[in-house]
Amino acid sequence: MMKKLLILSIIVFTSTLSAQVVSIAEGNNINIANGATLDIAGLEITPNADYSIVGENSVTKESEVITVNGNESMSKSYAAGVSLEGYTGSVLFNYTEDEMNGVTHTASLYVMNSESEWIQYEDEDSDDFTITYNFEEPLEMKAVTAGVQAGLSTIETEMPGIRIYPNPSSSIVNIDYSEDLEITLFNILGQQILKSNSKTINISNLENGTYFLITKDENNSITNFKLIKK
């Protein structure tokens, strides 16, 4: 079982329909042990070294859509009253279908630094409804949200009956669909890796990581898939 928060000084949780706030009184703090997890209403932080959130501070969860680098975010974000400095470890952003706001499951994690700049971090897990990134270098977090993957459309068009397998894959990926398709593969930077009409593609020569497979049928209906090369 995952280790839980070890030391929790005076802390007050409040909630409303629009926000949930963690407030730390002046002179108090939250201490998170190495490998323990603090879950702030769906935002999970697991430091890889002992970490403290020192009061006076607060973390607020908002349900409003915001604009991140020209695109609308999911309808969920978190903001700290004072930037969290020097954090290393993982950040996991949970979201629901109702919170997606037209953003696909290929979404990225976006973190605002103390200069109010949004920085994009590609999802490192292969699951829908969670976005994970492990920060090996010290990070400052003023706000966190999830938004569109750079270089890809914000809207994922549904195309019943299409599937890709296996996923993750180390070599061959099959696209199962009864009609003709145009297949395009992009890396996490939005750069095109290959384009084909074949329903079998070989990714054995690609580096391990996350890719995005885009299918287009004869009616120009497009579907996005997150593909993991292992």
Image (cartoon, rainbow, N blue to C red):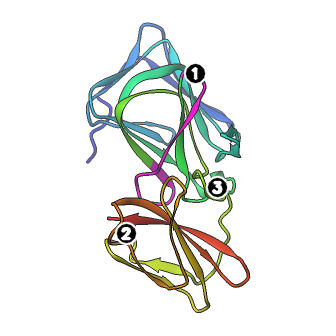
- Which element type, helix, strand or loop, lies under badge 3? loop
Q: Which residue is mark 2?
A: 168
Q: What stretch of residues is rendered in magenta?
A: 114-131
Q: Position of residue 227 (x, y in %)?
A: 45, 66
What's under tag 1, amino acid-wise?
Glu
136 vs 149: above or below: above
Farthest residue to the top: give it. 27
152 vs 159: above or below: above
Farthest residue to the bottom: give it. 178
Q: Position of residue 180 (x, y in %)?
A: 61, 89
At 40% from the left edge and 55% from the top edge, which residue is drawn? 125
Prevailing secondary structure class for the magenta stretch in the rendered image: loop
Left or right, 141 with respect to 115, comes to left
What's under tag 2, amino acid-wise?
Pro
What's under tag 3, amino acid-wise?
Val
Q: Nearer the viewer, mark 1 or mark 3?
A: 1
Residue closest to the eye, 219 or 47: 219
Q: Residues within 10 Å of mark 3 (few under 14, many from 20)?
A: many
Label 2 – label 3 distance at C-alpha: 22 Å
Q: Which residue is mark 1?
A: 115
Q: Quadrant of residue 170?
A: bottom left
| 126 magenta-colored | yes
Residue closest to the eye, 228 or 58: 228
Circle nearer the N terminus (1, 3): 3
Q: Which residue is mark 3?
A: 103
At 48% from the left edge and 55% from the top edge, which residue is drawn? 188
- Which element type, helix, strand or loop, lies under badge 1? loop
At 46% from the left edge and 23% from the top edge, which residue is drawn? 84
Left or right, 208 with respect to 158, comes to left
Q: Position of residue 157 (x, y in %)?
A: 68, 70
Label 2 – label 1 distance at C-alpha: 37 Å
